[in-house]
Image: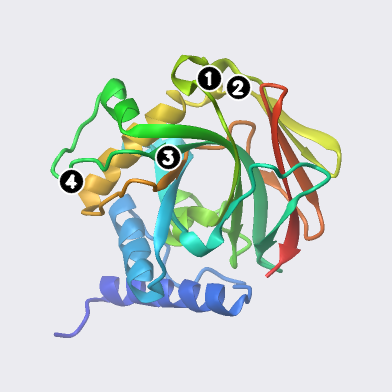
Amino acid sequence: MVPTPLQQNVDHIAETFVRARREGTAIVDYPGTIPVTLAEAYAVQDRALAIDGRRVAGWKVGKIDPQIEGVNRLAGPIFGDQIVTASDASIDNPVAMPVFRGGFAAAEAEFLLRVGTAPDPAKRKYTMEEAIELIDAVHASIEIASSPFAGINALGPTVTISDYGNNSGLVIGPAIEDWRDAAITDWPVELTIDGAAIGSATAATMLDGPFGAARFLFELLADRGIALQPGDWISSGAVTGVHEVSIGASVDVRFDNRLTTACTIVAR
């Protein structure tokens, strides 16, 4: 059967992004017709995942503002080979995180949730309480947002979705003890770049917070027919914003004025 023009466009976009990510090369112009709908954008992401073949060990969730199709969040995969455990990382002992030279690069302070119980693949809707019950740990973290395409965040959420949600890595920082009773949405979160304070906020400003991001993801992946496994990670959204970084920059995050982790930005 001859592929439809829509399928040809999906295949071309996915193949171009996967190749650029493998080779570490920049993409100057968006490689195809921009997906019009969320379904088209996730079709590109699904096709790229099939081509890529690496193990997905987590998912990032980001905000869509203004919302489209009544949806205010998006998601993208985080591959196992791009996740670094660095609970003892500090500004004096950062981990190195690669980004695409000539592409887009940013760092984000995020609450990181670990799936303790796999969601029922047939369940399509969750209450907040049901979503929280599936989580068994929460950590401080840094998400690295990077794409070979420098304009990924300028052309709208369907473009962001089409290239893995603009994810390129995750730094797992220290675990939060007693997180169920810690009122983490009220914690101050700060991000610095090269020692300069860049962003400060609380998760109370993030739609319905980190666990709302988990609820969104459980429902989205069920609709897409994608199973989550115990131990998978959910990077729940940028608390202080999406902060662009340059190669060579040092990034430090602090949660509740005491839990810290850090990284340096290097070229792929």
Q: How far apart are the two marked residues, 2 and 4, measured between alpha carbons? A: 32 Å
Residue type at numbered disc 1: Thr
Of discs 1 and 3, which sits in the foreground? 3
**Where, quadrant-wise, is the N terminus in this rendering?**
bottom left
**In the displayed structure image, the side of residue 48 where residue 252 appears, left or right:** right
In the displayed structure, would residue 155 be above or below residue 63? below
Q: Do the numbered discs 1 and 2 sit on residues whose CB atoms are within 8 Å?
A: yes
Expressed as whole percent of the image width and height from the top left, the position of residue 81 reads: 52, 64
Residue type at the position of mark 2: Thr
Give the Cα separation between the discs numbered 4 and 3.
17 Å
Left or right of 77, for residue 82 = right
Label 3 amino acid?
A: Arg
Q: In the rendered structure, which disc, 4 or 3, sits on the residue that comes first in sequence?
A: 3
Which residue is labeled 2 in the image?
Answer: 202
**Mark 2: which secondary structure?**
loop
In space, the residues marked 1 and 2 are separated at their CA atoms by 6 Å
Crowding around mark 3 (Cα neighbors within 10 Å: few <14, some 14 to 19, many 20+) is: many
Could you tell which of marks 1 and 2 lies nearer the N-terminus?
1
Q: Which mark is residue 121?
A: 4
- Residue 109 quadrant: top right
Helix or strand or loop: what does disc 3 sit on?
strand
First-in-chain label (1 vs 3): 3
Residue assigned mark 3: 114
**Residue placed at 28% from the left, 48% from the top?**
221
Q: Which mark is residue 185?
A: 1
Residue 27: name its quadrant: bottom right
Indicate the position of residue 227 as horizontal and vertical percent values.
25, 52
